[in-house]
Amino acid sequence: MHVTQPAPTVVRRICPLCEASCGLELKVAEGRVLSIRGDDSDVFSAGYLCPKGVALKDLHEDPDRLRKPLVKRDGRFVEVSWDEAFAEIERRLPPLIERHGRNTAAVVLGNPSVHKLGLMLYGPRLLKALGTQQMYSASTLDQMPKQLSCGLMYGSWLSVPVPDIERCGFLLILGGNPVASNGSLWTVPDFRGKARDMQARGGRIVVVDPRRSETAELANEHLFIRPGGDVFFLLGLVHTLFDEQRVRLGRLEPHLAGVDEVRQAVAPYTPERVASRCGIDAATIRRLARELAAAPQAAVYGRLGTCTQEYGTLASWLVDVLNALTGHLDEPGGMMFPKAAAFAANTAGKPGIGRGVITGRYKSRVSGAPEVIGELPLTCLAEEIEAPGEDRVRALITIASNPVLSAPHGERLSAALDTLDFMVSVDIYLNETTRHADVILPGRSPLEDAHYDVTFSQLSYRNHARYSEPVFAPPAGQPAEWQVLQRLTAIVLGLGADADLEALDDRQTLEQVRKLAGEQADAVFAAVSKHRGPQRLLDLGLRSGPWGDGFGARPDGLTLDKVRAAPAGIDLGALQPRVPEVLRTPSGRIELAPPVLLQDLERVAADLERPAPPLVIVGRRHVRSNNSWMHNLPVLAKGPVRCTLLVHPADADRLGLRDGETARLVAAGGRSVEAPVQLSDEMMPGVVSLPHGWGHHLPGTQLRVAAERPGANLNALLDDSQRDPLSGNAVLSGVPVRLEPVAASAGA
Ligand SMILES: Nc1nc2c(c(=O)[nH]1)N[C@H]1C(S)=C(S)[C@@H](COP(=O)(O)OP(=O)(O)OC[C@H]3O[C@@H](n4cnc5c(=O)[nH]c(N)nc54)[C@H](O)[C@@H]3O)O[C@H]1N2
Ligand SMILES: Nc1nc2c(c(=O)[nH]1)N[C@H]1C(S)=C(S)[C@@H](COP(=O)(O)OP(=O)(O)OC[C@H]3O[C@@H](n4cnc5c(=O)[nH]c(N)nc54)[C@H](O)[C@@H]3O)O[C@H]1N2
Ligand code: SF4
Ligand SMILES: [Mo]
């Protein structure tokens, strides 16, 4: 005999953990998750999920996840009420800003903030209230080069084309490993399945990567490339197109500016001249250029590996130049611009023309690094805290970010954080970064929040609109993150910690509506105000968006209610050509040859002969890990040790290293870490690979599962002075290292 269990309820929910944005189906009963699987009915992800999606249960239940605010008193964290936490912030933050000016407060936004509706929609309000130029994010460890090159070419920061994989016949991937990462700047759940379908149709996939990655393994062809060599390889390809008269502009011809300038700029870079610098021979470069030019439907996609290097912006630009010159940009089966249902800058304003983008409106105080999209390079933060002066950073707000592990030279940043006068972290864990805070304000479990992908619907392989309700009610008294940010905003605005947040939200939302709707503002505000908070902003975004109901003008169009009524999502179809409507450049054309990029080629010219260092390091991702913060979830943490150093057997022989032994990596400045060696012919000889986001041995954290197998911190080796000068992006790839055995007797 057994006791009757309560009947489980089935609920649908989009996974907020990575860019793939899979629809999940959860079985829940009595406030607990019984099981998680892919939602077969989801119009966008059709049942796909990865092990991290299943780990949402562990995340929801993790006893280490913070539920109450923490305040540091006499060096120790104590749990306090929300009122006490905000009172502490009000007591300490505004006086610092009043005394030293707005730039004394810095903000760091981390990766998960892009995945959270409340943080995406209310973060900008806090930033505006602060008015600080000291704004940092994970973007400058990641995709800033691509956003800059796209901004310069197409006129808005998030006009990033993505492969139309369902119709593509030839896909060239550089520096991306979507089989492990599930895609980036390309929202494409089940890449593997779509790649297989493509191959079954006779399509070809070529991967260019210093490691034979999981994606390379699946591809039809894999080419090793010298880390950081992409710009040379791409110049060789573009050169060949001109040299062999294979340029085909097609429909875009009248919309392209700068073709002749590109022709001139690439003239010196024959495949023969670039071959040794990129490690790919001239004949292969010529063959690939021909294949690309001849393919009726083809796409060149460059991702993380092409951005986190010293020529990140140039490489990102050349990827799109190749697409444009072979007639594959903005064409079905090529690289296409998504048309998001809400919030896309490239659907707002006048179609086909705009102000374009500018950078360098101000510079960082110490290194003089230019602002890009209102951000300074994260690798400048430590020095901005350290260097004396009136504008020194004395206060810091981190939001869903762990730069002590995720940014280069974390030890330096860690020491700098200890010298701050005040630090607040909006974060769900007491980890390597938040341990430095004076106050930690925890967000809710993702299952207690509503969800809509503000960013990733702008990067999706198909257009869609999907919304998830919260699965569970939050613990009594725990505010949503948008409310946490609104309260911080109220404090910064001088309205006080107990300000009327409803009134503040009404006022700020009405301001946004006025900008959007002009004379119709009052009517529009009234129409969307049956919703509150993020839902109101979402209704506003959807209804005023390209698929929206225009507040009655297009009665068949989207509203939040309609999207809500479709729990499996609304499919808005395959991507469609958008040039010239998508463009927001002052010329109204695609700028193929932005002067700042042509100028930057001088660095490349001077670097053509650089010999390969004996050994360089690159990163990698594993499907059971996510940057620095999922190592505390038992279902992901179990199994073999994943923080291993991949070394090619020939390098291991030369250095006297054996499989399974510990080796010491030493980088510039003498910094070193130790990691277990895993021999692998996946690696290009002369290149080793260690994943990032590990190093959970630091004291003062509350990550009990992660601490059992802390792993080595790749970023402890890397240098925070190495950046792509245009975008400010950190150089995380191709960094020279020395590798030596750790003597068995060295112990500990
Ligand atoms: N060497 C090297 N370094 C890298 C990379 C690399 O490839 N190589 N990759 C870089 C890239 S691409 C990125 S994006 C960055 C990522 O680096 P970060 O932006 O620092 O992000 P994470 O490491 O994912 O840390 C996420 C933080 O958010 C918190 N968090 C998780 N969920 C929530 C939530 O719902 N609410 C709140 N408030 N907090 C939450 C976690 O506790 C953690 O503190 O790392 C970069 N660092
Ligand atoms: N499982 C898992 N998924 C994730 C994440 C995670 O940590 N784990 N992180 C998420 C985040 S924040 C991001 S930004 C995305 C990133 O997603 P991707 O862009 O797919 O990045 P990676 O998986 O790191 O793959 C980068 C590849 O570039 C190669 N590479 C390194 N240097 C070079 C180079 O100089 N040239 C070329 N051509 N290749 C090079 C590396 O060997 C690696 O195979 O993944 C997201 N998804
Ligand atoms: S691939 Fe995995 S982590 Fe990413 S959205 Fe899907 S289930 Fe979540
Ligand atoms: Mo990222």
Image (tube, rainbow, N blue to C red):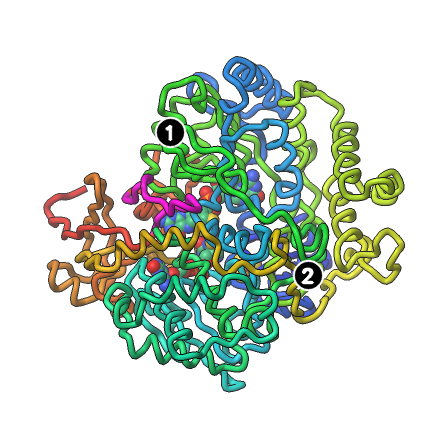
Q: Which amino acid does label 1 sit on?
A: Val
Residue 727 falls within the magenta-colored stretch: yes
Closest to the observer: 371 or 260? 260
Q: Name the residue under label 2.
A: 581
Residue ID at (38%, 47%) = 724
Q: What residue type is labelled 2?
A: Glu
Residue 191 falls within the magenta-colored stretch: no
Image quadrant of ligand 3 equals bottom right
**Mark nearer the viewer, 1 or 2:** 2
Which residues fall within the magenta stretch? 717-732
Q: In the picture provided, is 263 more to the left or to the right than 120? A: left
Q: Name the residue under label 1.
A: 366
Question: In the image, residue 486 lies at what x, y percent?
Answer: 67, 31
In this picture, is 395 found above or below 173?
Answer: above
Closest to the observer: 663 or 278? 278
Question: In the image, residue 98 lies at what x, y percent?
Answer: 56, 15
